[in-house]
Image (tube, helix red, strand yellow):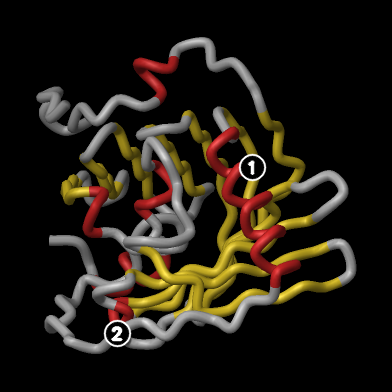
Amino acid sequence: MIKKKTWALTGAFLLLSAFAVPASHAQAVPAALSEADRADLARIEAYLNQLTTMESRFIQFSEQGVVEGRIFLDRPEHLRIEYAPPTPVLMVASDIILMFHDTELKQTSFLPVSETPAGFLLDDEIELGGDLTVTDFERGAQAFRVTVVETDQPATGSVSLMFEDNPLRLAKWRVIDAQGTEVEVALMEPRFGVTFDNPRDLFSTVDPNTSISVD
């Protein structure tokens, strides 16, 4: 079983808490959006759907401390997160499965990507509406921040995506889970539209302990 602290420490991309969240009948409260806001949200949605591949260093901030690593994205469906030592964690998402591997304890766990707060980033088509509700939209100097929750289960947590503008570029994100645990990730020197040499191996969800694939 994955340690609770490890889940919280390494959950910025797709997951945060190992605790189950009770079903809630609360409804998400959408943000009051101007026509300019809606136009910028349409730009952001188009950008996310046009995003194919990315490779980047990252710095992650949480109450447990600061950690670093590398992220590899091949939309849709594929993501790899390698934490730098001393954090002994590798996470790989492929299709509908997320693999979480503790390289120190030699423990591997799997869960559906659909059950993770930011799993929508790996969808074939990202829609900032419908299953997601935009609860906050902020505009700064050449920057935007969009906060979304699950429309039917807003209590499970929120994801805030931060973008630089001119040109539009994903720069960082923040995940807050149902318990209020907050983790923020900043991309460092990201490269977009890259070609991966061995994508099959890079995004493999073969358990390193058993060599049994769950694809």
> For the residues marked 1 and 2, what is the alpha-carbon distance in whole angstroms?
27 Å
Residue 175, image x, y percentages? 47, 70
**Residue 134 position (above or below residue 120):** below
Q: Is mark 1 on a helix, strand or loop?
A: helix
Q: Residue furthest front?
A: 35
Q: What residue sits 59% from the left and 16% below the top?
A: 195
Q: In which quarter of the image is residue 138?
A: bottom right
| Kind of residue indicated by mark 1 | Tyr
Looking at the image, which is closer to me, 9 or 95? 95
**Residue 41 position (above or below residue 201):** below
Q: What residue sits 71% from the left and 32% below the top?
A: 191
* Residue bearing mark 1: 47
* Residue bearing mark 2: 27
In the image, taking residue 31 as reference, residue 179 lies left or right, namely left
Mark 2 and mark 1 in contact (Cβ < 8 Å)? no
Residue 135, image x, y percentages? 50, 79
